[in-house]
Image (tube, rainbow, N blue to C red):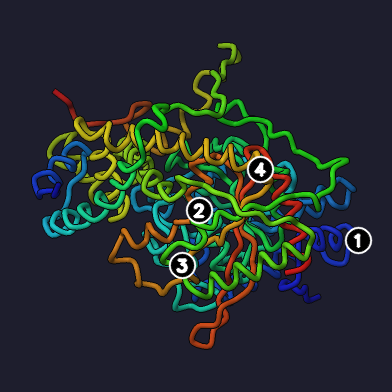
Amino acid sequence: MSIDLQTLSISKAHSALVKGEYSAVELAEAYLSEIKKKNEALNAYLEVFDDVIEQAKAADARIKKGEATMLTGIPLAVKDNILIKGKRVGSASKILENYVASYDATAIAKLKEAGAVFLGRANMDEFALGGSTENSAYGVTKNPHDTTRVPGGTSGGSAAAVGANLALAALGSDTGGSIRQPASFCGVVGLKPTYGAVSRHGLMAAVSSFDQIGPIAKTVEDAEIIFNCIKGQDIFDSTSMEIQNMKHGTWNIKKITIGIPKTFTEMEGISLEVSKNFQESLAHLKKSGFVIKDIELPNVRYSLPAYYIINFAEVSTNLARFDGVKYGFHMAGKNLLEDYRNTRGLGFGPEARRRILLGSYVLSSGYYDAYYNKANQVREIIRADFAKAFSEVDVIATPTTPTVAFKIGEKSNNPLSMYLADIFTTAANLGGIPAISIPSGFAKREGKELPLGLQLMGAYGHDQTLFDVGKAFQAVA
Amino acid sequence: MAVTKSDIEKLAELSRLSLREEEKERMRNEFDAILGYVAAIQEVSAASSTRTRSVIATVNVMREDTHPHESGEYSESLLSAAPRREGNYIRVKKIL
């Protein structure tokens, strides 16, 4: 039978699987056939697993026994920095060539327990450094809406896979917008959960004080289903915690107030089509009965520079472990020091090398206080700004990105212009707060309809509020 | 303050990675632009906060030092990932 993948959601697929309208094997085959047709052109997957059908058969057996969860038999793409035991994984880097995961990430273990089917590993910017998936050692992923444009990044493969119906949903990771920005560029939903809501055990670390695993999906409801499966405290990640899934209970969702930080959303450098679309989104939210209120986030304009300083510093320390001794690529030299230099010099791509050096710079004696310490102070100031704002409003709305998806190659020779594309997304990582990007419409460019996204940020631990407001927005947008 | 080529070489030395010649010059230019941009945080008044630790409660997460895994349970899978191995050892060049 043919399955309409375009309109499929997790709950629709689940209900069809349970009713026996099609099997998990048939569903997996439908995605494998799409992958076969489209992946060569899009390069969303670095690898399609050879045991997809076996996984789907196991899901079918479970469905037959009446033990299906919402995610049993649901085909997912997994970003190439999340470990699945026995599978190749490499953060799209040459330095991890031939590396096979020796254990399951906690998020993967939870999805396995729920019976999800993993289709393959999705392309990304090397070690989650970038904003376009152009920094992959295995070639750029193309945007399914216009193959001359980037899918965003760093979870570009995951977002393109979901946007092109090469997976029903996906896992990504978000350090400064790496789930939300590609979700916006590819016309899908992407959630960066509250810091600590989802265990990072088995996620390759980029910036440990920002990184979160999160879902990329077609609807807010689908993202919520995956989030509820993977969240929770984990002994293997001491930053993880139980997020009290705040149910609104007796209070009315329509009483939610949405704050607009105008000095931020009306900054220079935001394209006209994005501004116009954002105003339309606010009109939709108003129509849904939400109260819209102007707020101030006085220091939010410093979030991007502070974010990047902390990013460089933590990336340089986290990537120190890749030395050609314990795993992956090894390039021998005359002595051990040369082994390190050669392995790291040749194994890391240009952006990883650049950030390692920038990290060494901001952490070096004489600059440490001016850059790294100062950035940490700014992080606390921004957190205090958010705390104050969330005492007045429940949700803060901004566009997800300042422009539509840019052309492949447009920013790749200018790292600073690439960093500026993260202007709206990094604040949530500094704040440790949850944020979601939801498709909000399209802008027409060169005859192509390019997706735009609305970003909703919630107070610390209030991921559920984002799902509730997001679903209301999707119902009217 | 402009970044010099020798600054880049020193950073590469600290970072234990080799750089190609042409890359050093390109990075020097890029670093000037990037460091110039991120220096904007200097505008934030130092008086407004001296905290560098989180206002979100940070607590030590402790666990009992118990339930170790079986000795050797993971040795093979971890050793098999090493590029150079000799028996149950990872092989490296001599340091001294």
The relative height of residue B35 versus residue A417 in the rendered view (above or below) is: above
Q: Nearer the viewer, residue A345 or A51?
A: A345
Residue A392 has which mark?
4
Which badge, 1 or 4, is on the more N-terminal residue?
A: 1
Horizontal and vertical percent position of residue A295: 59, 50
Q: Nearer the viewer, residue A380 or A192?
A: A380
Label 3 or label 4, whichever lies nearer to me, is: 4
- Identify which amino acid the numbered label 4 is placed on: Glu
Foreground tag (1 vs 4)? 4
Are the residues flagged by discs 1 and 4 in contact, CB closer than 8 Å? no
Question: Toward the viewer: A271 or A323?
Answer: A271
* Quarter in which the C terminus of chain A is drawn: bottom right
A326 relative to A204 in the view: left or right: left
Spatial CA distance of label 3 from label 4 is 26 Å
Spatial CA distance of label 1 from label 4 is 46 Å
Evaluate whether label 3 is on the same chain as label 4: yes
Q: Are marks 4 and 2 on the same chain?
A: yes
- What chain is tagged by disc 4? A
Q: Secondary structure at mark 2?
A: loop
Quarter of the view holding residue A183: bottom right
